[in-house]
Image (tube, helix red, strand yellow):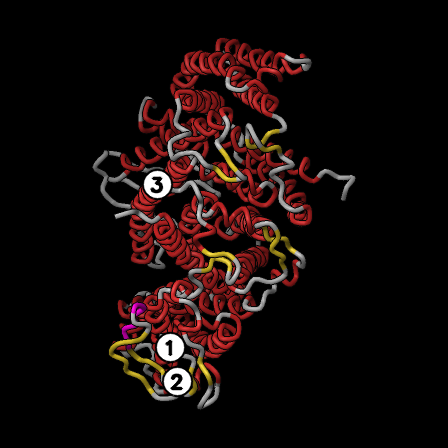
Amino acid sequence: MELDPILLSRLQFAFVVSFHAIFPVFTIGLASYLALLYGLFVKTGNPAWERLAEFWTKVFAVVFGMGVVSGIVMSFQFGTNWSNFAQATSNFLGPMLSYEVITAFFLEAGFLGVLLFGRHRVSPKVHLFAAIMVAIGTLISAFWILATNSWMQTPAGVEYRDGVFHVTSWLEAIFNPSFPYRLAHMVIASFLTGGFVVAGVSAWYLLRGHDVEANRKALSMSLWLLLIAAPVQAVVGDMHGLNTLEHQPTKVAAMEANWERESGVPLLLFALPDKSTQSNDFEIGIPHLASLILTHEWNGEVPGLREAPADEQPPVWITFFSFRVMVGLGLLMIVFAVAGLLLRRGGRLYTSRPFLQGLRLMSVAPFIAVLAGWFVTETGRAPWLVYGMMTQAEAVTPSLTGGMALFTLIGYVAVYAVVFYAGVYYLTRVIRQGMTEEGEVEDVERAMRPLSASHVPYDDDFRDGYTTRS
Amino acid sequence: MATIDLSLIWAVIIAFSVIMYVLMDGFDLGVGILFPFAPDEESRDVMMNSVAPIWDGNETWLVLGGAGLLGAFPLVYSILLPALYIGVFLMLAGLIFRGIAFEFRFKARRSRRWWNVAFAGGSAVASFAQGAVVGTYIQGFETADRVFTGGALDWLTPFSVLTGLGMMAGYALLGAAWIAMKTEGHIQQWARGLVRPLLLAVLAVFVVVSLWTPFIDPNVWARWFGHLEVIWILPVLALGCALLVWRGAARGGEKLPFLATMGMFVFTYLGLLVSRWPYVIPPDYTLWDAASAPGSQLFLLVGMLFVIPIILGYTGWAYWVFRGKVRPGEGYH
């Protein structure tokens, strides 16, 4: 079998970006939460807020470090695997990605150090200021990245001349039609991720009776956040969908596995889309619901996949099922947020074991939902890389062979497997150790390193006869 | 806009980022290369301590240079990376492994020896790959119609292997000089003893590369043996620095060997730039051929001119805070 460099490059990019994305999606939400916790501590002086803030700062340090390490590869992949794309879009992409680097550096250089290591060197107010700046910095980073991605979905403000995109209006290119919706959808997703992780970890601590006072506060506030953010996300997602319907109808058709343009289209709960027959098998649907959701009209018209030639149709199967996973988990999040409100009114929020156990499990849900959402939007754009203007086949590096792409794909999977295993293993130890001071080993610490801010040993066997000292 | 040559400004910025990266990440990569040969585990702690607070700031220049290249000279970015496909992967894998080794080694007990391997192996592979990039660059690229047309292993030639090994020796020399400057006692003695042998290795590669380079391309030959006699000052200054390193090592000088090694790197680098100027993708494309649209260069230049002084200031501050000797068992609190 001939190895296809395009498919392998797509797999490689999807793997690397998926692996990387889970870290920033968490840190963006968590950074704002930290700013809030330090703010509450400054305002009330209650040490419980401080304990929470310090614990979650440790977690933040590890996750941020993992994000930085896994992100280095991204900035090189455009050149190694998609060099024609890099060359054609560089007039826009180059400045966008560079501004992201500048933002990230600014954040790390200026304020992250103070946030992670400056607790006892600066006043609480200055420290709070640093926390707020880090939170803002993560949001600005997201701004650049999502502007870039949205431009690839709904290109604007450019002119395509001699195989190169030239920017005619920076404002139109950055604030392209899908950008506001995608940015809002993603930032709320980050808050949901932060919220569910904090809720899940707090629930686990409450189940074990660990620092009950602080963790009740953390659980309570994260559930209030989720009660607002989860339904709002559904509304924003709906608006994002309307925007996609307008600008990328084929993607919407793939999300719904709808082959013919029709009115009164049912919402498919299950189907097996088959590209060869251009139809679905085993459809189970609710009449008219897809039309109602997508167009807000009972008999609204939904675009069909067959409007695009077969070779310009996305891989329907992935888009269709990823969309269902995302929406299903989103609805489950709303259920948990509402259940939290009901239990709160019944006074059983902190004691209902099934609910707390459920929250524990839900802490992975937003990560899966975010990845599923990205699969929808990215596979739904296929075969285009810049929608309607440049295909993946035109974008791939001409000199790239299938063997080369396979080699690095396996290589990156192996490298990231080690990084991920080491990172998650360590993060689990940080969380297991909890918020108590005991067990903090005198560690040989280095300032300025994100992970140095978490004072937890990596493993605990002294077999080498080696002891650390302070 | 016609009065300001933005491409030239950008060429200076990128060239500056590259040499900053080489000088700054160079010595901490060198520390990694020397890691397995350290006298004992305590020395390894001290060695790692001496670069831990600053290494990721050093790597900022790599990311900044890479992103700036895409923004200002996309042709370079989109030919260099495909041409060096396998080499870039090896470099990134090496940098990632040593990056996480920095994070986790201090916290590890039982698994510490594995993090040692990751740190040393990652540093060595990344250094070799960077040196091979230099060699590939000097040799030039097979292109047609603004696209790389060569094969996956074109970059791996006897010449690039030589420059790869030379870069490892050069980084190790920087690392040894850094350790000699930042430590005391038996670690310092050990590092100081390495300076002269490593210097000889570097000089051997320097001589072979210098003799070989003019024969690779008639243009390089014409550059060195044409009218521009003034450029011969560069190799002379590089060798002058080498002499200072040699003598500094003998007299037990602390800062001199390190600074003079940096001088060697700077003058050799300038010599390479002169060899190929103004071609950024030798032998076909000049920096003006490779430039992005002036509007894009200008848009990004605003941000760069704002951030580079801050990076420099921050870097200077970090080195100031962590100045002085690193002692065993002493962390930065």
Q: Which residue is mark 1?
A: A258
Q: Amino acid at mark 1?
A: Asn
Circle nearer the viewer, 1 or 3? 1
Question: The disc numbered 1 marks a residue on which chain?
Answer: A
Q: Nearer the viewer, residue A252 or B57?
A: A252
Horizontal side, residue B153 vs residue A187: left or right = left
**Tag 3 residue:** A404
Horizontal and vertical percent position of residue A342: 36, 85
Residue drawn at point x = 43 percent, y = 35 percent: B84
| Labels 2 and 1 positioned on one and the same chain | yes
Of callouts 2 and 1, which one flags the residue occurring earlier in the amino acid sequence? Answer: 1
Within 10 Å of disc 3 (Cα), the crowding (few <14, some 14-19, many 20+) is: many
Numbered marks: total: 3
Tell me, yes or no, whether the two marked residues, 1 and 3, touch with CB atoms within 8 Å. Answer: no
In the depicted view, which residue is nearer to us: A420 or B300? B300
SS of the residue under disc 3:
helix
Labels 1 and 3 positioned on one and the same chain:
yes
